[in-house]
Image: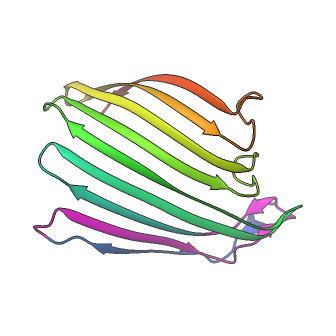
Amino acid sequence: NFFGAVQPTYLGQLKWAPPEGKNTALFNFMLTNPKFNTPNAFAFYNCFNFQFTHKFNDKASYVLDSTYSYMNDNPGVGFADWYGAVNYFIYKHTDKITSTLRAECFNDSQGVRTGFAGLYTEVTYGVAWAPVPSVIVRPSVRYDNNASNSPFDGKSDMWTGAFELIFRW
């Protein structure tokens, strides 16, 4: 019965965005009774997220997105927490071409979120090409690593490539 897992949850946000400023900041939070609901196998957790954006100029910008979450009574673990930060460096080459370099660290101390405990690091580079406003072509390459465990088919690291074709309407 999924409805047995319902409980009050509060979502909130504080935002700082000066009208003429180059910086914005957001603090998002989700508050509930952060406890694993065993009968329904459902995880309720508190989450705190901070985002900071800086616009260097019309072509270059930076985004920091960081999160901390925790939960109690996780089966076999008890208290569990996980946290991380992602950095985005975005450069607009032309009106149609933008590139993004992404670097992330994510610590899943008990392996509750990923199934494998450890500090995950990731770097991605991608290009977005919009030949027309309703179409975006996005190839990218990504490297992932977990120095404490082997979550990627028995390996501690993995290379991937992706190709996305997005149609807007």
Q: How far from the left and from the top, in percent, is residue 43? A: 73, 62
Q: Say whether residue 169 is visible.
A: no
Q: How far from the left and from the top, in percent, is residue 150? A: 75, 35
Residue at the (54%, 24%) spot, across then down: 160
Q: How far from the left and from the top, in percent, is residue 69? A: 61, 66
Against 37, residue 124 (above or below) is above
Against 102, residue 86 (above or below) is below
Residue 32 colored magenta?
yes
Q: Is residue 87 left or right of residue 109?
A: left
Query: Which residues make up the magenta segment?
Result: 19-46
Residue at the (31%, 68%) spot, across then down: 25
Against 162, residue 62 (above or below) is below
Quarter of the image where one finds residue 12: bottom left
Q: Nearer the viewer, residue 80 or 42?
A: 80
Q: Say whether residue 55 is visible.
A: yes
Quadrant in the picture for the N terminus: bottom right
Residue at the (29%, 29%) spot, across then down: 128
Q: In this view, does 91 lie to the left or right of 80?
A: left
Against 16, residue 140 (above or below) is above
Q: Which of 140 and 154 is in front in this view?
A: 154
Quadrant in the picture for the C terminus: top left
Q: How far from the left and from the top, in percent, is residue 130? A: 23, 27
Quarter of the image where one finds residue 97: top left
Quarter of the image where one finds residue 92: top left
Q: Which residue is at the far front?
A: 147
